[in-house]
Image (cartoon, grey):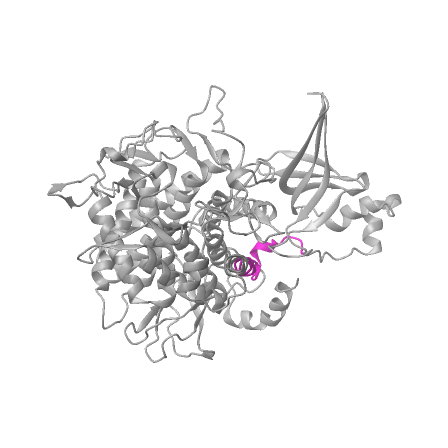
Amino acid sequence: MKNLFQTMTVVGRVSELEAARGRFCLRLLNGDTIAVNVSPTTYYEVLKNVGNDQRDRVQEPSSQQYEAALGSEVNNPTKRGIVKYVKAGQSLAITGIYYQNGEHISFDARRIVLQHSVEGRHGFEETHWWLQQINTLFEQWLDALFGNVRDFTVNDFAKGYRTHLDLLGSTTDEVTQESATMSRFLYGLSSSYLLTGNERALSAARACADYLIQGFSVVSHDRRYCFWKFGRTKDNRTTKEIVASLNGDDLGSYALYEQIYALSGLAQFYRITQDTGILSYIRMTVAAFQDFFADWTKRDQTFQGNGGYFSHIDPVTMRPDSPALNLGNGTNNVCKKNWNSVGDHIPAYLINVLIALEPLPKTETGEWKEFRVLCRKILDDCVGNILTHFFKDDSPFVNERFDASWNQDLSWGWQQNRAIVGHNLKIAWNLTRCGHYYAKRALELRVEGQVNQAGEYERLSKRCYEHACELGTKMDELGVDQIRGGIWDAVERKANAAGVHEFAWGSTKDFWQQEQAILAYYIMHGIPGQDEARAGRYLELARACASFWNQFFIDQDNRKMYFRTDESGTPVIQGQYGIMAGHAIAGYHAFELNFLAHVYVRTYVSNEADDNFALVFCPCDTQATKTLNVLPDFMPPGAVELFSVRVNGVDQVGFDKTSFQIDVSRFPNHSRVEVEFRPLRPGAQSADDIEQRRPTSTALNMAP
């Protein structure tokens, strides 16, 4: 092509350095190398967190270093910039002008972003990074909805909560409050408190949970089941309740993924508070899943035995086979199953509920054991169906839609035979978490002498790891943008004649899918006993995706996240994408990323700084439930240990470092329980090392 000019972003590591010539080479994720030229208009930055001003603390080289690198060009300011900011092996993100004129090709850098002021480090792996991001996000979100309110009531949420906010955080003409998005926001508030201990987050979470239950729960006449209304909206001077979904793909139904996500915030909030009233609504909702959506229970004396969950039921007949679920135009939801109806149980509520119930709480009330057995069965069913049915053809991408008998449904609505890259990495991420869980279960069963069952769980753990890594490696090749970092959105599952999986629509990237990639590659990096080269590649991919997220998805002006960018990171803000909040963006994925990226980096990535991390809990009734379970996430056995426990500001002694169940019965209700964890990976620092380093590392890592 002649005279092609294009703004382009590249991400990689410096492979060659020719400062005296005003250039260097960058090795990209795919192994290719691109020559980068600098000019008088090239400028350098250090990666900024949300709401940050500039973070450049790069040390000035000595005059001798400048002279050795530049010789007669020692006073050239453009070339001096390379000497100061660019080092061999350094990770950089560069935005510049790509120029092609026939065989002549050049790439001229305009913006060069370092990942840290200290060579070899990454800002998003520092102790403070995700804490600051989650705190800034939740404070901004609450300010946008409620102004300066610091202590919240149910009335605040009834009056002020809105699902839809515009680009600047202001309310729109759409005043609907959706239950699933409110619960996702509750997840974000709860996660913010877990990481930061900010009392504003806890106050808002408590009020949000109460309003969610008061305003949106639909409890059956016998109080055995709970369903969740789609939403509430103002109708003149009254409130109109919306029972069935208004989302286009799910119109007029109880959509299971919406019912599932109504539990996401409640489950995370329950981890903090152990509020048995909250757990009762979780239990009633799960009972509804089993008796109305599950394909492995009795319904009207007819046994449905294919496993999994139907994606929709008719809210009138309460059946998945109602003709009313066929919306036309190929969107047929009659007796269908999909990724969301099967896999979303795992991250939305199952993991958090099982963490809260294992070991069984010591309590004088509640049928914890039966509910734990049921949750384990649901987890086993979901994992088994993913392993059995989602990898069933020769496409490198999972299949996502099925009929009742698990035959592939390649004609549904907009999806047809298309893949969502983020779903593939979400499956890799959650299979890895489940692999950790089954490894832990196997160890417990061996200790109990149940050798055969332990062996079954060991094999299941191995299958989870193998399928997760299979997906992680395939998405490295087909889903990750090898030039810029980040992952693509939707592609065709089958390659064209040239072997290319074409984009379904555009070469865009969505915020929630970047989250799945970052978490998947960080946690897969920590899979025990895997090949070092593969683990290193996963870490490289995690960092490339985290770099893209922090550089391009953060709206620095408004302290929020963009929903979508183009391939080079330019935000897409037209139409539905130019909002702060809506049906698909509700303070969930960004907060989940902040919470778990912090946990995963501290646990699985070796840093020179203090790797310890802490979570904060606030049990509401320490007499009814006498113990508190504090494991951060499904983790492999021996991943972390308790380092310290502090209750209401007082350090506790005599606790078992290997037990993640703490006795809180002697403390008052609503005590603040701060639990510090230490990773136990090979090479992790000793307790003495940590204590000696703390003053220095804290001062360094909290620097602006």
The residue most toward the front is: 237
Q: Is residue 242 above or below residue 676?
A: above
The magenta segment is 118-136
Q: Position of residue 32 (x, y in %)?
A: 62, 33
Q: Residue at x 30, y 36 (%)?
A: 389
> Quick one: 337 or 641, which is closer to the camera?
337
Q: Is residue 686 above or below residue 482?
A: below
- Residue 206, picture quadrant: bottom left
Residue 684 forms part of the magenta stretch: no
Closer to us: 55 or 280: 280
Picture coordinates of residue 79, whole percent (x, y): 81, 44
**Residue 434 seen in render:** no
Q: Confirm whether residue 563 shows in the render.
A: yes
- Quadrant the C terminus occupies: bottom right
Residue found 50% across the figure and 20% down from its top:
498
Q: Residue 50 vs residue 183: left or right?
A: right
Q: Quadrant of the N terminus?
A: top right
Instruction: Please report the residue visible at 52 percent of the width from the left and 58 percent of the height from the top.
Output: 134
**Residue 147: image x %, image y %?**
54, 62
The reply, left or right, for residue 363 in relation to residue 666 is left
Is residue 134 a member of the stretch shown in magenta?
yes
Residue at position x 58%, y 45% in the image: 548
